[in-house]
Image (cartoon, rainbow, N blue to C red):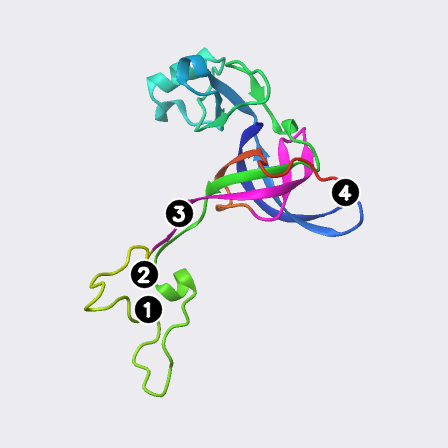
Amino acid sequence: MKGIIAKKLGMTQVYDENGALVPVTVLQAGPCTVMEVKTKEKNGYSAVQLGFGERKAKNAGKAMIGRAKKVGIEGNPPSSFNEIRDPDTELKAGDVIKADIFAVKEYVDVNGVVKGKGFQGVVRRFNFAGGRASHGGGWDRRPGSIGQKEKPANVIKGKKMPGHMGNVPRTIQNLLVVKVSVEENLLFLKGAVPGPTGGILTVRSAIKKSIKTK
């Protein structure tokens, strides 16, 4: 499986080869440095740990600065880390991965943390209709009855109620790679991806599709 850490730069639109306007999300994909290679013999599974971005050395611990120097990073250490399981190619610590690992018309899965919305009621959180506004309606945006007094005499687990909304990991599958800018390490993906502008994402090869045939 191929994978890279990316930063969401925002959305725009481009024209495809047929002249159709395509909405795309622009990602800064890499460059990512291979920080560690994990093997089944030593770690129990096969993976590569990637480092992306940079943080000020004064904000990083000595262990992180030492790890960065070990793989050839003399400046500021990476700010984000993630693992890619079962990599397709043989990589070693210190190798650099860029956006050109993906090609146009490939499909990818993008994982990230969606925007946080704070504490929300059921109308916002689950699209409840709320109570009627007239003819004896005594409530507008409340959930209504949440259970029975006699049986089962408790609120069923998983009941849709007010609570925290957003700020959870989500994966969008089968996004088409529309364009790759090798010089600027940019990926243009058809559609939207999770998270706010500037959010950190993980882009992996799609597990359900491989390449667009038409």
| x and y percentages locating residue 104 in the rendered image | 70, 35
- Whichever of labels 3 and 2 marks the residue nearer the N terminus, that label is 2
Nearer the camera: disc 3 or disc 1: 1
Nearer the camera: disc 3 or disc 2: 2
The residue that label 4 is drawn on is 214
Q: Secondary structure at mark 1?
A: loop
Tell me if residue 81 is in the magenta stretch.
Answer: no
- Tell which residue pokes out farthest to the right in this image: 18
The residue that label 1 is drawn on is 143
Q: Which residues are magenta?
A: 164-192
Quadrant location of the C terminus in the rendered image: top right
| x and y percentages locating residue 102 in the rendered image | 65, 31
Picture disc at residue 167: 3
| x and y percentages locating residue 31 in the rendered image | 57, 26
CA separation, marks 4 and 3? 36 Å
CA separation, marks 3 and 2? 15 Å
Res 43 quadrant in image: top left
The residue that label 2 is drawn on is 162
- Whichever of labels 4 and 3 marks the residue nearer the N terminus, that label is 3
Residue drawn at x 48%, y 20% is: 46
Would you say the residues marked 4 and 1 are in contact, meaning their CB atoms lie under 8 Å apart? no
Residue drawn at x 47%, y 41% is: 112
Would you say the residues marked 2 and 1 are in contact, meaning their CB atoms lie under 8 Å apart? yes
